[in-house]
Amino acid sequence: MSDPVFFSASTTLSLGAIAEAAGVSLPEGADPHRVITGAAPLESATPQDVAYMDNARYGDALAATRAGICLVSPRFAPRVPAGTVALVLRDPYRAYAGLLARLHPDAMRPASLFAASGVAPGAHVHPEARLEPGVHVDPGAVIGPNVEIGSGTIVGANASIGPGVRIGRDCAIGAGVTLTHALVGNRVIIHPGARLGQDGFGFAMGPGGHLKVPQIGRVIVQDDVEIGANTTIDRGASRDTVIGEGTKIDNLVQIAHNVVIGRHCVIVSGVGISGSTTLEDYVVLGGQVGVVGHLRIGMGSQIAGSSNVNRDVPPGSRWGGTPAKPVRAWFRELTTLARLAERSGGDEPKG
């Protein structure tokens, strides 16, 4: 069996170009014309590769690396071996990400199955849909009536775009995505299997049965949002569900009806956000956080993974635990429980 390389570097970069992109100067004696052809981890990097280091766990790997150039934070710079050019900067990971984007631009979003733009054989585009020039539609995709899609957008294989949906320019709609009742901005990435715009979970419950509440809102996805694989975002019940500009959502996240998420939030895998909750700008939810409905999480707040939020969170807070509380209180609680366990001897009950 052959061993395919899915993301070959599409260009090369000189040391001088790398330093310029990072906004720092090359160390004295480094050849600015030396060519770098790829990127690799510290352990496997060759003299033709760029690597990065900003975590003490990888100190030994840094000391042994053969990378041609290493982006490194000041505290680890002394451990860079003599054969590697050290490019010292405050945020090496961010600089490394920018270099990867230049070396591997095709890895930045889901790709079309076909190099040429247009509608592939086996796709179905309703005659009343309006596609700007430069839209890619892969086999099996279905685009309904009155859909509008902007130029440069890719619609992946077997994606389903419901009637009246609007999708902006330079978006990537992954394979098997379902979009209904949605307005999607520019440069949005929706990974395979995501579902946007389906019914919210709304019922008027009673002893005679649970009466379904019609969900008549929409999903609004603003510019530069990224939505992970198999994430679900329900349309609003009476108002729109909104995902703010620049927000990044991981795989397997559930966002319920009427939720409003601000700009540049980060929502990690396994999170569940109940209906009518608001996240202000720059909120971070760690993996598997659960948020009760009708709450407000203030701007810039961070919630630790596996926490359960059952009350409003003030702006700029760091909370954790179940139920979630300020981290200092949470740590005190954990420390107290640990001490109580030690005093009890920690023995298993005997029976």
Image (cartoon, grey):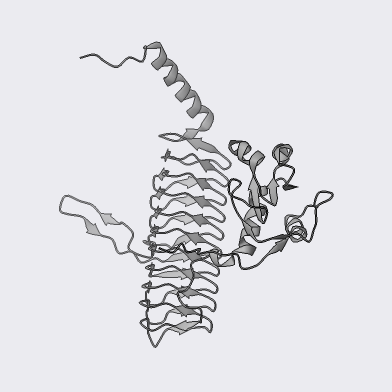
Along the horizontal axis of the image, is 141 left or right of 51?
Answer: left
Q: Looking at this view, name the residue that lies furthest to the front.
A: 1
- Total marks shown come to 0
Residue 54 shows up from this direction: no
Front-lying residue, 292 or 232: 232
Residue at 84% across / 50% down in the picture? 29
Give the image location of residue 5, x and y in percent.
Answer: 51, 63
Above or below, 115 relative to 179 = below
Along the horizontal axis of the image, is 117 left or right of 310?
Answer: right
Along the horizontal axis of the image, is 11 left or right of 310?
Answer: right
Residue at 69% across / 45% down in the picture? 72
Front-lying residue, 40 or 94: 40
Quarter placement of the C terminus: top left
Residue at 25% across / 55% down in the picture? 204
Residue 65 shows up from this direction: yes
Give the image location of residue 176, x and y in percent.
Answer: 37, 68
Q: Looking at this view, name the residue that lies furthest to the right.
A: 28
Give the image location of residue 331, x and y in percent.
Answer: 50, 27
Along the horizontal axis of the image, is 26 left or right of 155?
Answer: right
Give the image location of residue 128, x and y in percent.
Answer: 40, 86
Residue at 68% across / 65% down in the picture? 12
Above or below, 350 relative to 315 = above
Quarter placement of the N terminus: bottom left
Front-lying residue, 311 or 197: 197
Q: To which quarter of the image does residue 233 belong?
A: bottom left
Front-lying residue, 349 or 106: 106
